[in-house]
Image (tube, grey):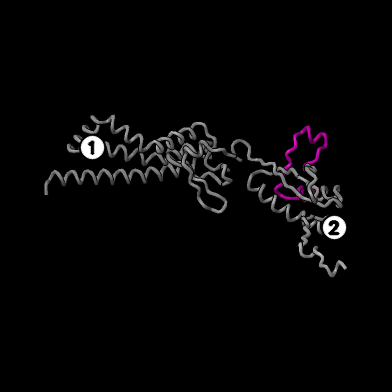
C-alpha cells in the first residue's frame, strides 16, 4: 500500500474523529452551561442555544479546510475550484438559497428576539406550543400533545405569531356562557363571578386606582342577544397561558353545575322538521 495514501487516510480519519469528539464535548459543555447559569446570570438562553447548534457547523468547516490544505491533491483541487469560483458560487448559491435564508433568518431571530426558548408561541395555522430550540436552520416547538413542530426559520420569520410570554405572561381570558331569555341574568352573572373568584388560578389584576373605586375583580358583560340565548362573557385574569386554559375548562364545568342547581337554563337550538308528504292531503281526506 502506498505510504502516502495510508498517511492521508489516517489524516482524514483522525481529523474527522477529532472534529466529532470536539463537537460532542463542546455541545455538552454549552448545554450544561445553559441549564446551570442562564437563570443565575439572567441571560436569555436563546443565545446559548443558537451558539450550541452553530458549533458542529463551525468545527466541521474548519476540519474540511484543514484537510484540503494538508493533502496536495485536494489542495490542487481547491485551487482549481477557486479558479472557477464564479460559476461554482452561482451554482451553490442557487442550490442553497433557502438554506442561507434560514440561517440569516435565524440570526435575525437571535438579534431582534420576537420569541425565545421557553416562550409560549402560536403560529398562524393555529399550532401552539413552547419554543424548545432555535437552530441555524429551523425552530422546534413542542406542542401540548408533546409533539415537535419543526418550522424553517425563514418561514417562521414571515409568519404572524402570537407570543404569550414576550413581556408579560399574564392572560386576560374571555370565557363565554349562554343563558335562556327566561333566566335571571343578574343571578347568572353573580354565579359566574363567584366561581371565577374562588378558582385558585384567578388573579386580581386591578390597579390601586381601580381597587379604590371598588371595581369588581371579575367583569362579566352581556355581549350579545343570540338567536336562542343571551351571551355572557367573563373577563378573568390568570398568571400564564397554561393556567388560563385550565381555568376556562374548570369554570365551564363548575358554572354548568351551579346553573343546573339553581335552575338557570343553558339553551340549545330546537328544530322542527316537517315532511312534505305529511302536509299533502289526499282527495278522500278533502271530501
Question: Relative to the observer, which residue lies in front, 234 or 8?
Answer: 234
Q: Please provide percent x and percent y for residue 140.
A: 49, 45
Please tell me whether residue 171 belongs to the stretch shown in magenta.
no
Q: Residue at x 67, y 42 (%)?
A: 171
Q: Secondary structure beneath disc 1?
A: helix
Magenta part of the chain:
193-218
Give the side of residue 5 with respect to residue 214, left or right: left
Q: Please provide percent x and percent y for residue 200.
A: 71, 49
Residue at the disc numbered 1: 68
Q: Nearer the viewer, mark 2 or mark 1?
A: 2
Q: Please provide percent x and percent y for residue 242.
A: 63, 48
Residue 1 higher or lower than 166, as above or below: below
Q: Please provide percent x and percent y for residue 274.
A: 78, 61
Q: Residue furthest bottom?
A: 284
Question: Relative to the observer, which residue lies in front, 24 or 287?
Answer: 287
Give the side of residue 230 with respect to residue 41, left or right: right
Which numbered disc, 2 or 1, marks the residue that appears first in the sequence?
1
Give the side of residue 55 with respect to residue 233, left or right: left
Q: Residues within 10 Å of mark 2 (few under 14, many from 20)?
A: few
Q: Residues within 10 Å of mark 1 (few under 14, many from 20)?
A: some
Residue at the disc numbered 2: 263
> What label does residue 99 carry, if any?
none
Please tell me whether residue 214 belongs to the stretch shown in magenta.
yes
Q: CA distance from mark 2 to mark 1?
A: 83 Å
Q: Does residue 141 appear anywhere in the picture?
A: yes
Dominant secondary structure (helix, strand or loop) of the stretch shown in magenta: loop
Q: Quadrant of the C terminus?
A: bottom right
Amino acid at each position: 500500500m502506498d505510504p502516502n495514501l495510508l498517511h492521508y487516510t489516517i489524516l482524514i480519519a483522525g481529523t474527522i474523529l477529532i472534529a466529532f469528539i470536539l463537537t460532542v464535548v463542546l455541545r455538552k459543555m454549552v448545554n450544561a452551561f445553559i441549564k446551570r447559569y442562564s437563570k443565575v446570570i439572567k441571560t436569555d438562553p436563546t443565545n446559548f442555544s443558537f451558539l450550541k447548534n452553530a458549533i458542529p457547523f463551525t468545527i466541521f468547516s474548519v476540519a474540511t479546510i484543514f484537510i484540503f490544505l494538508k493533502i496536495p491533491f485536494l489542495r490542487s483541487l481547491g485551487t482549481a475550484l477557486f479558479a472557477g469560483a464564479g460559476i461554482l458560487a452561482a451554482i451553490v448559491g442557487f442550490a442553497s438559497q433557502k438554506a442561507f435564508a434560514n440561517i440569516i433568518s435565524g440570526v435575525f431571530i437571535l438579534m431582534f428576539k420576537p420569541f425565545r426558548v421557553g416562550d409560549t408561541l402560536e403560529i398562524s395555522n393555529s399550532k401552539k406550543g413552547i419554543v424548545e430550540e432555535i437552530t441555524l436552520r429551523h425552530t422546534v416547538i413542542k406542542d401540548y400533545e408533546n409533539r415537535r413542530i419543526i418550522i424553517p426559520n425563514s418561514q417562521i420569520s414571515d409568519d404572524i405569531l402570537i407570543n404569550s410570554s414576550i413581556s408579560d405572561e399574564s392572560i386576560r381570558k374571555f370565557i363565554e356562557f349562554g343563558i335562556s331569555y327566561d333566566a335571571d341574568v343578574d343571578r347568572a352573572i353573580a354565579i359566574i363571578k363567584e366561581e371565577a373568584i374562588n378558582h385558585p388560578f384567578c388573579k386580581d389584576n386591578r390597579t390601586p386606582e381601580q381597587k379604590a373605586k371598588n371595581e369588581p375583580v371579575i367583569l362579566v358583560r352581556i355581549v350579545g342577544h343570540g338567536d336562542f340565548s343571551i351571551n355572557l362573557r367573563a373577563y378573568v385574569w390568570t398568571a400564564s397561558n397554561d393556567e388560563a386554559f385550565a381555568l376556562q375548562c374548570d369554570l365551564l364545568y363548575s358554572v354548568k353545575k351551579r346553573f343546573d342547581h339553581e335552575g338557570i337554563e343553558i339553551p340549545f337550538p330546537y328544530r322542527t322538521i316537517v315532511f312534505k308528504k305529511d302536509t299533502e292531503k289526499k282527495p278522500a281526506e278533502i271530501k
